[in-house]
């Protein structure tokens, strides 16, 4: 009985540790604390973050499946380098899926979600004034996550979450443009207004312009 209780406690703790390790490593990748092309050592990550080797190893495997790291036999783990092909591919897939997602969100918009859009826009405006890039990145993730959650399609939400996380790393290529964050804020405001309007054509145009602007800004800096 004691052994069974110990096993149940361990089993209950395991997913939490795995998830925490995954989120911590992922955050460092998407904010470029672990730079594109950088080799990672699981033992060093374990020591740095305070997790055991097992949850770190499992987190790395999961991140590999998501395309954020690459496991190279006999060499180790490398943060996936950014490439022109990836930027173009991710942008294309985002545009197709985000238009549909935003149109669904427009049909299913709730008062709570509507209020949260206002909150995100207000916080983003403050972050722009403070030039707090990491906060802006996280607000961008939250903004697109809210659209996906409001759309109410779990599969689509999972697809877009991965695409957004891969896109966040691209922010660092565009930081030399001081107007970048303000343009993103304006584009987010247009998307929210379009969602509220319920006009599918307007939504498609706002989303297309947002992703097109993001891609153009990156292509001028690589």
Image (tube, grey):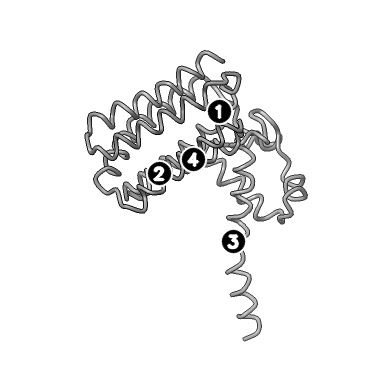
SS at badge 4: helix
The front one of 203 and 19 is 203
Contact between marks 3 and 1 (CB within 8 A): the answer is: no
The structure residue drawn at horizontal position 55% and vertical position 46%, both measured from the top left corner, is 62
Residue labelled with disc 1: 171
Please name the residue shown 61% across and 30% down the image.
131
Say whether disc 4 or disc 2 marks the residue closer to the N-terminus. 2
**Cα distance in 3D space between marks 3 and 1:** 29 Å
Where residue 170 sits, quadrant-wise, is top right
Give the residue pinned by disc 2. Answer: 117
Side of 126 where 46 appears, left or right: right
Query: Reading the chain from its start, which is encountered first: label 3 or label 1?
Result: 3
Marks 1,2: beta carbons within 8 A: no
Residue 68 coordinates in the image, percent (x, y):
56, 36
Identify whether 11 is placed above or below 88.
below
Residue at (43% x, 21% y) in the render: 213
Q: Is residue 59 left or right of residue 208?
A: right
Mark identifier at residue 100: none
Gap between marks 3 and 2 measured at Cα: 29 Å
Kind of element beneath mark 3: helix
Label 1 crowd (10 A; few <14 / some 14-19 / many >=20): many
Count of residue discs:
4
In the image, which disc is placed on residue 16? 3
Label 1: state its secondary structure.
helix
Viewer-nearest of discs 1 and 2: 2
Q: Earlier in the sequence, mark 1 or mark 2?
A: 2
Which residue was labeled with disc 4? 141
């Amino acid at each position: 009985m004691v052994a069974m209780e110990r096993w149940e406690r361990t089993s209950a703790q395991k997913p939490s540790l795995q998830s925490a390790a995954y989120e911590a490593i992922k955050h460092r990748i998407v904010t470029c604390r672990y730079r594109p092309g950088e080799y990672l050592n699981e033992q060093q990550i374990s020591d740095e973050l305070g997790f055991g080797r097992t949850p770190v190893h499992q987190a790395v495997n999961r991140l590999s499946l998501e395309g954020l790291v690459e496991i190279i036999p006999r060499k180790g783990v490398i943060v996936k380098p950014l490439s022109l092909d990836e930027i173009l591919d991710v942008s294309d897939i985002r545009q197709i899926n985000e238009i549909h997602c935003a149109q669904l969100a427009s049909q299913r918009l709730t008062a709570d979600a509507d209020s949260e859009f206002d909150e995100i826009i207000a916080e983003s405006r403050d972050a722009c004034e403070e030039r707090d890039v990491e906060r802006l990145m996280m607000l961008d993730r939250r903004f697109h996550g809210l659209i996906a959650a409001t759309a109410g399609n779990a599969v689509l939400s999972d697809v877009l979450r991965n695409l957004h996380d891969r896109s966040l790393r691209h922010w660092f290529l565009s930081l030399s443009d001081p107007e970048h964050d303000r343009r993103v804020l304006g584009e987010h405001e247009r998307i929210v207004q379009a969602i509220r309007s319920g006009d599918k054509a307007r939504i498609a145009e706002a989303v297309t312009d947002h992703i097109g602007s993001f891609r153009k800004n990156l292509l001028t800096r690589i």
